[in-house]
Amino acid sequence: MFGLGTQELLIILVLVMIVFGAGKLPQVGGALGKGLRNFKKGVKEADDDIEEGQVEEIVDENGDKKKDT
């Protein structure tokens, strides 16, 4: 997972425990979960818009059309 071994993950967990404290970990985890859920939802909606052809063309100040990359 991201090239991290067991020791690195344990060090990160200890640092998170020190910074946030054991009482706040459920709140931090919940907020992180909600953020990931909203990100996935936004990506899915963007993909759906692209598949449906609802993406607008970009026109520069000269009136030339550009591709949205």
Image (cartoon, helix red, strand yellow):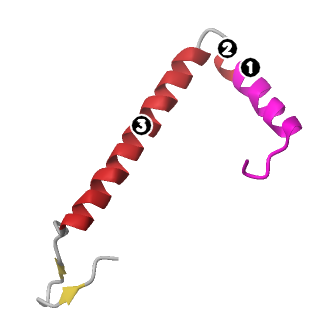
Magenta region, residue range: 1-17
Q: Residues within 10 Å of mark 3 (few under 14, many from 20)?
A: few
Q: Where does label 2 land, which residue?
A: 21
Q: Earlier in the sequence, mark 3 or mark 1?
A: 1
Q: Where does label 1 land, which residue?
A: 18
Percent position of residue 39, x then y = 40, 44
Where 61 sits versus 4, above or below? Answer: below
Number of labels in the image equals 3
Which residue: 36% across, 53% down?
Answer: 43
Q: Are marks 1 and 2 in contact (CB under 8 Å)?
A: yes
Mark 3 → mark 1, Cα distance in angstroms: 26 Å
Percent position of residue 10, x then y = 82, 30
Where 55 sits versus 48, above or below? Answer: below
Mark 2 falls on what kind of element? loop
Mark 1 → mark 2, Cα distance in angstroms: 5 Å
On residue 55, which mark appears?
A: none
Which quadrant of the structure image shows residue 15? top right
**For residue 9, side relative to residue 42 (left or right):** right
Q: Is residue 14 magenta?
A: yes
The amino acid sitting under disc 1 is Ile
Q: Where does label 3 land, which residue?
A: 37
Instruction: From the viewer's side, name the closer residue of 35 and 53.
Output: 53
Percent position of residue 21, x then y = 67, 14
Percent position of residue 42, x then y = 33, 48
Mark 3 falls on what kind of element? helix
Mark 1 falls on what kind of element? helix
Which quadrant of the structure image shows residue 55? bottom left
Q: Main secondary structure of the magenta part?
A: helix
**For residue 23, side relative to residue 16 (left or right):** left
Q: Residues within 10 Å of mark 2 (few under 14, many from 20)?
A: few
